[in-house]
Image (spheres, rainbow, N blue to C red):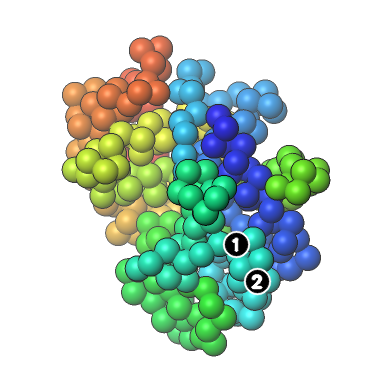
Amino acid sequence: MNRIIDLQTALLDLLQKVHDSEIKLIAGGGFGIYLKTDHVRRSGLRTLLDQWPEPRSTNDLDLFLRPVLLIESSKLKPLVSALSDLGYQVVPGAEKYQFVKPGPGDTQAGSVKIDILTGPQSCFNGTGVKTDTRRARPKPSVGIHAHPVDEALTLEKGLLSIMLIGTLSSEESWKSEIFLPHPYTFSMMKIFAFRDRLDDPNKEFGRYHALDLYTILATTTEEEWEYALHLRDQHKNDPSTKEAGNLVSEYFSTQERLGMVRLMESPYYRPELQNEDFISALQEMFPL
């Protein structure tokens, strides 16, 4: 869990730098799932499933920007300054939307990587933001881009606000607000991420995406579940929603499907996990 502590410190450092700005970050990825699991465990709220996997390790922070920040790009200047002040460097080939902070001694060990993402390209129709499948480029440029995620069509709906409390790298105590995507949004993104990685040996053939998908559903509260069904009905005719239903049917509709096989291959998998209940809930959220 040391990597989780490192990432929490890195995120708090960043949040401390931008706390007086209009930048309200949304944490996705494995660390966002860890934060959600920790929040629900501490709150004692009833969740969709009783059995959860152990939190998996992760090496990076997936931080989503609300589209309005890219549309009104001057609001991003504090984030650009913060990344520079904290020693982050651009990742070659992904300049302006992926950044890495080297570990001690300028080494890869202990490094922290940040991916900057945003909502679908359609959010920027009729604005000055130029988009393609890789980048959303603000105009005027302020030195930062974001990777658009077309399946995150409900990115700003049902966000969960939590207070992240911990220690800065300066060893000063700090707390800041961070937002987490709604389980419907999170699940949608993970379904497509699994599809994109199921043949990739460098990404464990999608095993950790399948595990994440289970964890997202397992830690969904009763209130979140009701809202997920509302979002399902509201967006049932969206092409991404229909494709998600197809992917769930293809990969997660029975225990023999490839998505479930990948889940059970994960080193974090436990026989006590409620596979059948997970399959049923996922199919209800994303019906064929």
Mark 2 or mark 1, which has the lower sequence index?
A: 2
Q: Nearer the viewer, mark 2 or mark 1?
A: 1
Front residue of 214/88: it is 88
The quadrant of the rendering that contains the N terminus is top right
Question: Relative to residue 36, is residue 133 depicted above or below?
Answer: below
Drawn side of residue 224 relative to residue 178, left or right = left
Amino acid type indicated by mark 1: Gly
Return the x and y of residue 16 as percentages of the image width and height: 74, 56
Secondary structure of residue under mark 2: helix
Tell me where residue 245 appears, x and y as whole percent: 28, 44
Front one among 20 and 96: 96
Task: Give the residue at x 60% y 62%.
Answer: 87
Whether residue 217 is visible to the viewer of this picture, yes or no, is no
Where disc 1 sits, the SS reads loop
Question: Residue at the location (45% across, 48% down)?
Answer: 108
Figure check: 85 above or below 124: above
Q: Crowding near pointer 1: few (<14 within 10 Å), some, many (20+)? A: few
Number of the label disc, if any, that sits on residue 87? 1
- Amino acid at dot 2: Ser
Q: Which mark is residue 242?
A: none
Residue receiving disc 2:
81
**Disc 2 to disc 1, C-alpha distance:** 10 Å
Q: Quadrant of residue 47?
A: top right
